[in-house]
Amino acid sequence: MNVDFFSEIYLKILSLFHFFDLEKILNLLSIVPFVFLIELLFVGWSNSSLKKILKPNKTVQTDLFYFSLILFNFYSLLVVLFSFGFFHLLNKGIKTYIGFNLIHTIENTYLQFIILFIIYDLVKYINHFIFHKSKTLWNIHKFHHSATDFSIFTRYRFNPLEGAITSFVKVLPFVILGGIETYVVVRIFSEVLSLMHHSALKSNWGLIGKYILVSPATHRLHHSKDPKHFDKNFGVVFIFWDRLFNTYSDENTKELGIPNNEFNKRGVVKDLFYVVVSFYNAVFLKIKKVFR
Ligand SMILES: [Zn+2]
Ligand SMILES: [Zn+2]
């Protein structure tokens, strides 16, 4: 360990307290209003997220809270605090020590892009699937499903612990395969789509939504409160993973949320810590079981 190592850590910690990152704010504000506008054009003012945000109910207030955590970079600080810096170190470690750059063995850059995009999305499908199937991880992910209405900002309704795990998993294919420049394009496309998925749009996008892309109707069903819709439509960008792994459903969604929803009542800060405590409690019980 040398002076550089410590100065890098010092700079990293300083950056966590950089709550007004103009570039980050502009990046977010260049995508989000675009989706608000599209939604407004298709569903009209009375059903729009903009109207909901001007007079927010409890669930929309939570969405707004998480959007502001991300907008003003509090989220990264919470990620580090709640994971005790573990995922930050892990991210740094894999980026430094792994870098096979395998994708560059393919010469055609278009093919490189398509392969990376498909693998990236498959990893996200698997990540999402595991967050539902593992009881320990469901303690974190169910918070995203506790939204009883969509406000576009529902896209940001994730506990920082989920953000930490997912961002580590998402970057893995690029670390192993290389082609990190593709990541920027993929992220923008994926971001616009995810915002649409959590809007008042309910379209199934016809054949495209049936076989290629995850449509707003498909993701809405993923948030359905009806138990017969549980564990369906895990796809993030491409719907063909759900077709392939038999988790696809195109039924109609009536109500959003989870049964016995304990969220949206105690207040946003209490809910934030409740998720963290219940996750570590579940982890602790698992460890105790192993060593018993
Ligand atoms: Zn889910
Ligand atoms: Zn969602």
Image (cartoon, helix red, strand yellow):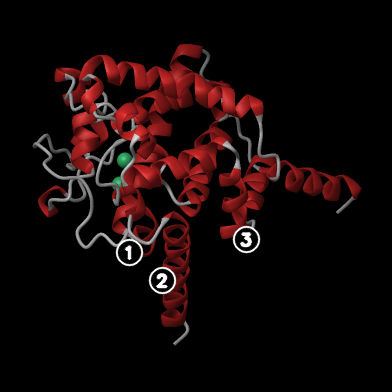
Residue 24 lies, in percent from the top left, at 60, 28
Q: Amino acid at mark 3?
A: Phe
Q: Mark 1 and mark 2: span between their CA atoms?
A: 8 Å
Q: Count residues near mark 2 (Cα–Cα under 10 Å), then give few for <14, some for 14-19, many for 20+.
A: some
- 4 or 191: which is nearer to us? 191
**From what the image shows, is residue 233 above or below residue 85?**
above
Residue 193 lies, in percent from the top left, at 35, 25
Q: Which mark is residue 282?
A: 2
- 269 or 28: which is nearer to us? 269
Q: Amino acid at mark 1?
A: Lys
Q: Residue at x 18, y 40 (%)?
A: 221
Between disc 1 and disc 3, the foreground one is 3
- 68 or 100: which is nearer to us? 68
**From what the image shows, is residue 83 above or below residue 64?**
below
**From what the image shows, is residue 198 above or below residue 276?**
above
Q: Count residues near mark 3 (Cα–Cα under 10 Å), then give few for <14, some for 14-19, many for 20+.
A: few
Residue 136 seen: yes
Q: Which mark is residue 209?
A: none
Q: Mark 3 and mark 2: span between their CA atoms?
A: 17 Å
Sequence order check: which comes first, mark 1 or mark 2? 1
What residue occupies the far front of the structure in this picture?
55
Q: Is residue 21 left or right of residue 252?
A: right
